[in-house]
Amino acid sequence: MNDKKFRPVFWDSDEDCLYILDQRKLPHKEVWRKLTTLAQVEKAINTLAVRGAPLLGIVAAYGVYLGVRKCRGGQKKFFKKLDEVIKRLGNTRPTAVNLFATLRRIQEAKWLSQSFSVDKIKQEIFNLGERILAEEEEQSYSIARNGADILDTSIRVLTHCNTGVLAAGGIGTALGIIYEAHRRGYVEDVLVDETRPLLQGARLTAWELQRWNIPYKIVIDSAAPSLIANGVVDVVIVGADRIVRNGDVANKIGTYSLALAAHKHRIPFIVAAPTSSFDLSLIDGEKIEIELRPKDEVLSFAGKSIAPPQARAFTPAFDITPAELISAIVTERGVIEKPDIHKISAHISRGSLAIDMAEL
């Protein structure tokens, strides 16, 4: 994999459409989907054809553009349509904050665009998608370097879900750190949680590691805490879908048990995420809305039922890891050791997390 060129989403200017790599088909097929409408973007997000918090932020911008580009009429009609499109995308997946950050950047830019033509505003919404893609890619390389800087040599890493280029663009977040650490000769082995129920680890993370020629083993989710207890893991590195003011982290279901095990057995538990994944509007993780997925994702496998016909399912897609279990959060700006509300505030204030209203 040429990480500097491979993109799981890109805009095709010749066909005037968005292409996404359908992550549901990996690792056996590389299928590219052509998206030309808002409805297609919504479906791609809801069905996890495209996923990963930073990547959802990128796709959201292009999705807004696809939703408004054919709108005709004056500004009043256009802004009504824009509000409708933003609301529809905001109803797709509630936990990953990057999607909402993108929508907020567009929504809050409206007041700057009153003197511009509708066509100019449309173009600037498209340009925002291009900028966010470039931002996330550049940030991922910085995260990778910052994270590798705090690791030792000859480490055995455990990771969960998928946090590479497929989730973030660029080189990824947690997986980007692993890639950079491997490039420096630090990584002895990577243990990859399968990540039930949709196997993002076994399907996607393994696919990326194999293309990078990084040694890995797939382990079942329920085995991971015992592997930590038995001393075969030196560090746990995961991503994040949302980080709130006190340092609590929302990430793929199963993350919390890894943090508990790492804390109990005194090995580092590291979270990697861009600052675009921080949500300073929430004080703690109790306020994060946890997405519930369709029950069939648990009650069936590969299209076949695996449970009794009347079985019910509880299907949270994410869990909350309290800040006190986290050794460090790595961002593109540096490292927050033993995060708390004061350290996060200081870290964020070194740069601007304020909404940068697309330069309309």
Image: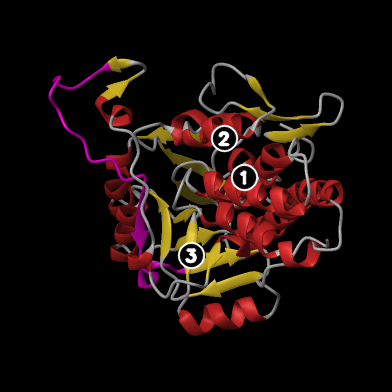
**Which label's residue is closer to the chain start, 1 or 2?**
2
Earlier in the chain: of badge 3 and badge 2, it is 2
| Nearest to the observer: residue 149 or residue 110 | 110
Is disc 3 in contact with disc 2, using a CB cutoff of under 8 Å? no
Identify the amino acid type marked 2. Answer: Val
Point out the image quarter for the N terminus.
top right
Circle nearer the N terminus (1, 3):
1
Residue 243 circle label: 3
Q: Residues within 10 Å of mark 1 (few under 14, many from 20)?
A: many
- Tell me whether circle 1 and circle 2 mark residues in contact (CB < 8 Å): yes
Q: Which residue position is annotated with label 1?
A: 55
Q: Mark 3: which secondary structure?
A: strand
* Residue 226 relative to residue 204: left or right: left
Disc 1 is placed on an element classified as: helix
Question: In the image, is 3 to the left or to the right of 192?
Answer: right
Q: Secondary structure at mark 2?
A: loop
Q: Give the residue type that dot 3 points to.
A: Ile
Boundaries of the magenta span? 305-327
Residue identified by numbered label 2: 50
Q: Is residue 274 visible?
A: no
Identify residue type, mark 1. Answer: Leu
